[in-house]
Amino acid sequence: MKIAVLPGDGIGPEIVTQATKVLEALRRDGMKIEMEHAPIGGAGYEAAGDPLPEATLKLAKDSDAVLLGAVGDWKYDTLPRDQRPERGLLRIRKELGLFANLRPALLYPELASASTLKPEVVSGLDIMIVRELTGDVYFGQPRGISTLPNGEREGVNTMRYCESEIRRIGHVAFRIAMKRNKRVCSVDKANVLETTELWRQVMIEVAKEYPEVELSHMYVDNAAMQLVRAPKQFDVMVTGNIFGDILSDEASMLTGSIGMLPSASLDADNKGMYEPSHGSAPDIAGKDVANPLATILSVAMMLRYTFNDEAGATRIENAVKKALAQGYRTADIHTEGCNKVGCAAMGDVVVAAL
Ligand code: IPM
Ligand code: MG
C-alpha cells in the first residue's frame, strides 16, 4: 500500500508526523506500507511556485491513498488567488475526483465535559456528515471579482449541481445509513435556492432504492439550529459542499474539539484522501500544542475505507480511546484533573496504546 503523505502548512507537519508514527508502528507489525512525502499548499508554493505542484499531484494519483495535514497561512493571503494554499486543496480534491467527504462527529465519553454543550445533550452523539466535495458554489462558473460599467466592484460565485452529482453523493449517504441507524437527513435551502430544490427532488428519487432507510429533509438554517439544540436526532446528514463545510465545523464542536474530527474524501472506487476536518491553525503552529488525534483517526478511516482493514481501523480507534481513558489530553480538550500533553507526546501515547 503506497501512501502519499502531504503535511502542508501550519500545524500540518506536526500532526502528520504523529499519524505517520502510527503507520510506522503498524508497519513494524507486518503491514506492508510505503510512504512518500510531498509539499502542498503554502509549502507547495514555496517549493515549486504552485500550491499543488505537478509532482505532488502525480504522486497522489500514483498512490493508493493520500494522507493530508492542513493547508493555509495568513502570509499567503495576498498571493494571486490561484496560488493560494486553499486552491491547492480544492484542486487535488477535484483532480482525484474525491466527491464524497465523510466527516463523522462522534463523542468520546471521556470528552463529554469538554463540549460546550451540556453532557446530556451530547453524550452518545454519533453523526456522519456526508458532504459533497467537488461541486456547488466552490467550483461553479462564472466566478470572480470584476468592475461594473459604473465603476463599482462586483463579486460573483455560482451555485450549481447537476443531477448525476447529486445522485452519486445520495447513494453514498444511503449506503452508509444502511450500515448505521438507517436514517438520512438531507440538508438544503429548497425554499430559496433552485439548485437545492433539485437536490431535494433527486434525494427523494434515490431514496426509493433504499426502502429501509428513512429520508427526511431540513433547511440548512434549521439544521444549524438543531445541531446545537438536539444533535442526537441525526444519524447520517447529507448535504452540498458549502453547507457541509459549515455544518461539519459546527458538529465538530459538539464533540469537544474540532481537533478530534477525522475525515475521508473518497472517489467512486473508494480511493481516498484522509485529513483532519480542521485547518492549519498557524497561530499555534510549531508550538507542539496541536491535537494530533483527528489526523490519527483519519489514518483509521484510511484503513477502513480504502484498505478494507476494519480490524486495523478499530485497533487505531481503540488506541485513541485508551489514550483518552488514561487521562491524556492536548490543550484543546483539557479539563481539570487530566494529564496535559503536547502534540508529539500524544502521538507517543497512542503508539504505546496500539
Ligand atoms: C475544509 C476547509 C476547506 C474547505 C478550505 C481550507 C478550502 O475549510 O476542508 O473544510 O472549505 O473545504
Ligand atoms: Mg471547513
Image (cartoon, helix red, strand yellow):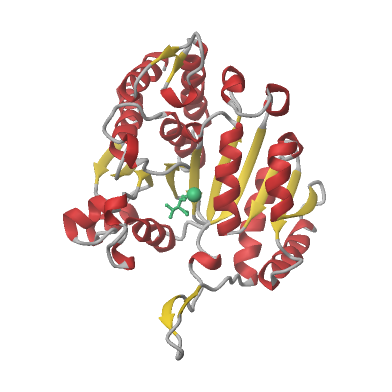
Closer to us: 301 or 118: 118
Left or right of 118, for residue 75: left
Residue drawn 30% across the image and 41% down it: 10
Left or right of 7, for residue 323: right
Percent position (x, y) of residue 215?
79, 51
Closer to us: 313 or 217: 217
- Establish if 220 lies above or below 177: below
| Quarter holding residue 117 | top right
- Establish if 345 lies above or below 295: above
Residue drawn 61% across the image and 29% down it: 116
- Establish if 146 lies above or below 95: below
Question: Is residue 40 in view?
Answer: no
Residue drawn 31% across the image and 60% down it: 84
Tell how many labels. Answer: 0
Image quarter (top left, top right, bottom left or bottom right) of the C terminus: top left
Percent position (x, y) of residue 156?
50, 75
Percent position (x, y) of residue 69?
35, 42
Left or right of 243, for residue 33: left
Closer to us: 152 or 65: 152
Image quarter (top left, top right, bottom left or bottom right) of the N terminus: top left
| Quarter holding residue 76 | bottom left
Question: Is residue 91 in view?
Answer: yes
Percent position (x, y) of residue 13?
28, 38
The residue at the far bottom in this view is 149
Residue drawn 38% across the image and 62% down it: 91
The residue at the far left in this view is 47
